[in-house]
Image (tube, rainbow, N blue to C red):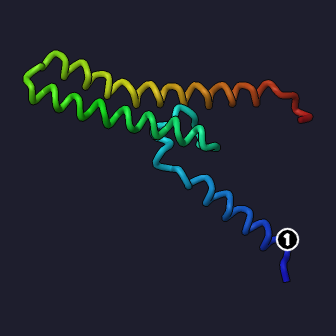
């Protein structure tokens, strides 16, 4: 027999599984959670861009263009930092909006 507690447990399990579906991609996502395919595509493009920057930095280092290699490496370091700052801003904005709601809601 299906009880209310079993349904609540199944729902909780489903929510946990759906949250961790794209857990590795949240590092490259500018949003705190990945909810749609557009978010997945955006995170994959940022990950691909980071990989390209690392490869180009290595290639330019092998070609003895140290200045260009250091600039590309700097951009590769700056990309995840900017994504993390963007995530924190969105979470802070969401928290601030939640605090502005009346208590009755």
User: How crowded is the residue under tag 1: few (<14 C-alpha within 10 Å), some, or many (20+)?
Assistant: few
Image vertical order of residue 51 relative to residue 82, above or below = below
Q: Quadrant of the C terminus?
A: top right
Residue 36 in picture, x, y percent from top left: 63, 43
Instruction: Please report the residue visible at 53 percent of the width from the left and 31 percent of the height from the top.
Output: 30
Taking the view exactly as shown, the residue that stands out farthest to the top is: 67
Taking the view exactly as shown, the residue that stands out farthest to the right is: 104
Q: Which type of secondary structure does the marked residue at label 1 adopt?
A: helix
State left or right for residue 29 relative to residue 3: left
State left or right for residue 22 relative to residue 2: left
Figure quadrant of residue 77: top left
Q: Quadrant of the N terminus?
A: bottom right
36 and 19: which one is in front? 36
The residue that mark 1 highlights is 4
Residue 95 in picture, x, y percent from top left: 69, 30
Image vertical order of residue 7 relative to residue 60, above or below = below
How many numbered marks does the figure carry? 1
State left or right for residue 96 relative to residue 63: right
Instruction: Please report the residue visible at 76 percent of the width from the left and 30 percent of the height from the top.
Output: 98
Figure quadrant of residue 70: top left
Instruction: Please report the residue visible at 62 percent of the width from the left and 27 percent of the height from the top.
Output: 92
Taking the view exactly as shown, the residue that stands out farthest to the bottom is: 1
Residue 54 in picture, x, y percent from top left: 26, 33
Image vertical order of residue 77 relative to residue 71, above or below = below
Instruction: Please report the residue visible at 47 percent of the width from the left and 30 percent of the height from the top.
Output: 84
Residue 35 in picture, x, y percent from top left: 64, 44
Figure quadrant of residue 45: top left
């Amino acid at each position: 027999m299906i009880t209310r507690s079993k349904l609540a447990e199944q729902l909780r399990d489903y929510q946990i599984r759906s949250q961790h579906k794209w857990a590795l991609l949240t590092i490259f996502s500018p949003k705190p959670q990945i909810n749609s395919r557009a978010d997945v595509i955006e995170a994959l493009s940022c990950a691909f861009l980071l990989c390209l920057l690392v490869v180009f930095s290595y290639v330019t280092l092998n070609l003895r263009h140290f200045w260009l290699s250091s600039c590309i490496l700097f951009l590769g370091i700056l990309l995840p930092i900017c994504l993390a700052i963007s995530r924190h801003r969105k979470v802070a904005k969401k928290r601030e909006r939640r605090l502005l709601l009346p208590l009755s809601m």
